Amino acid sequence: MALIAPTARGGDAGATAADGDPLAAPVVIPNPLTLQEAVDLFRTHGFDLLLADAAVAGARGDLVAASAFPNPLVSGAGGTAFAYHPHLCDTDNCSGTAFNFNVSDQGLLVDLVVGKRRLRIQGASAALEAARHSRADAERLLLPAVREQYTQAALASAVLAATREVASRTADTFGLVQRQFDSGAASEADLARAEVAKLDAERAVDSATETLTSAKAALAALLGARDGGAEFELADPLKPFAIPASLRDATLASLREQAMANRPDLAAARAQVQSAEAALDLARRERFPDVSVSAQYQQQGTGQEAIQPSTATFGLSLPLPVLYQNQGEIIGAEADLRTRKIGEQKLAAQVVADVTSAFAAYQSGRDRVQRMESRLLERARRARDLVEYRHQKGAASLFEFLDAQRTFVATQTEYYQDLGDYWAALYKLEQATALELDT
């Protein structure tokens, strides 16, 4: 069993810049379209993955901002003393011009000592990790959905082909009965039954055509097509029944265990807990005031008789936390951490439920298809062919033939539906376990 891992592009949304803007590139769906081509198109143009890539890029920007050092604050001023007369000074070079310069570290030194920047980086790093896991989770959910939608389209195509075959047979039967009626060998009731069967088969073809068009339109939307893009054929037929090797010895317990280890949404929830823990530590650390270290130089005039001789001063400035010690932010951070932990536990319980229900659906779908393929489908086809042969020889009535035909069509349609349900259940199990089971 292989974990559905994000591609290099998915793990680092910034990689899309090298490939150009996927939103600007038109989505061209190949005709005919294979399942692998559909998966590749989704990975490149799928709207949900593009949104997840944008979220990863945003989280990366937050990390860059959290890692940045504050810029030093530099200020300067100049002026003159209006009541000072330099020409009355006993020494040369007297001046009434004043200027000063001030430099502050904006709390950088104390921030490094106390560790606030480290906590901000820790929280942003955990948030970025959560965003990356969320991106992988989008792929976990949607890649099987693409495969399932392709399978639904292939199912609709198979049903359409079967209904067209039935329509052709019923048209031939109606033609035969029409000739028999014209020659007096068939009753008007037989002719009416044959015509009803023909019209019903044509209605089934129309319905199957509509279903196929809708399925292809839904698939095109998943692949990022903006213009409908349903004008394509499917290169791969409905896949025959097969049990993946990775599931032959699998048990519910083993699948649950692997899901708990592999589900990216669980990993994202754990990363969000880590981010909330860092945010709580930072909120507590914020009780320590931001101390700014500054250096100042000022001077007014020159020489010994200067109004303000050259003076350098160093200072500290900080707010006094006597009225408020960040209590509200700490309470909010504690509540957020508690919420994240409860969410992680709730999600873990949901993972167990997802795997349980998906595995049950897989087993049920597998058993139905095996029962169909073991005897029922072939016997229904054989019965239809035998009754058709007997009817052509005059040994079976038209009613018997039409009844055998309806039974076969119903059985074949049910088989195709069971086969589609089986693959849909398998893809749901892939989603639940985050394992690529269809190999």
Image (spheres, grey):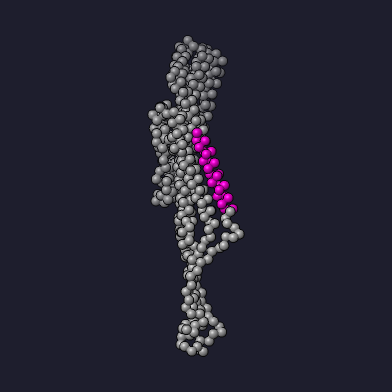
Task: Name the residue nearer the viewer: 171 or 162.
Answer: 162
Residue 240: percent from left, percent from top: 41, 27
Q: Is residue 49 above or below residue 418?
A: below
Q: Does the magenta stretch include residue 351?
A: yes
Which image quadrant is residue 261 in?
A: top left
Residue 4: percent from left, percent from top: 42, 38
Q: Is residue 399 above or below residue 413?
A: above
Which image quadrant is residue 82 in?
A: bottom right
**Magenta residues (range):** 328-352
Task: Name the residue nearer the viewer: 7 or 179.
Answer: 7
Task: Tell me the quadrant of the picture where the N terminus can be found.
Answer: top left
Seen at 48% across and 61% down, the residue is 110
Seen at 45% across and 30% down, the residue is 253
Task: Name the residue nearer the viewer: 67 or 44.
Answer: 67
Q: Can residue 225 be seen in this view?
A: no
Seen at 43% across and 31% down, the residue is 254
Q: Can residue 43 be seen in this view?
A: yes
Residue 303: percent from left, percent from top: 46, 83
Q: Does the magenta stretch include residue 269?
A: no
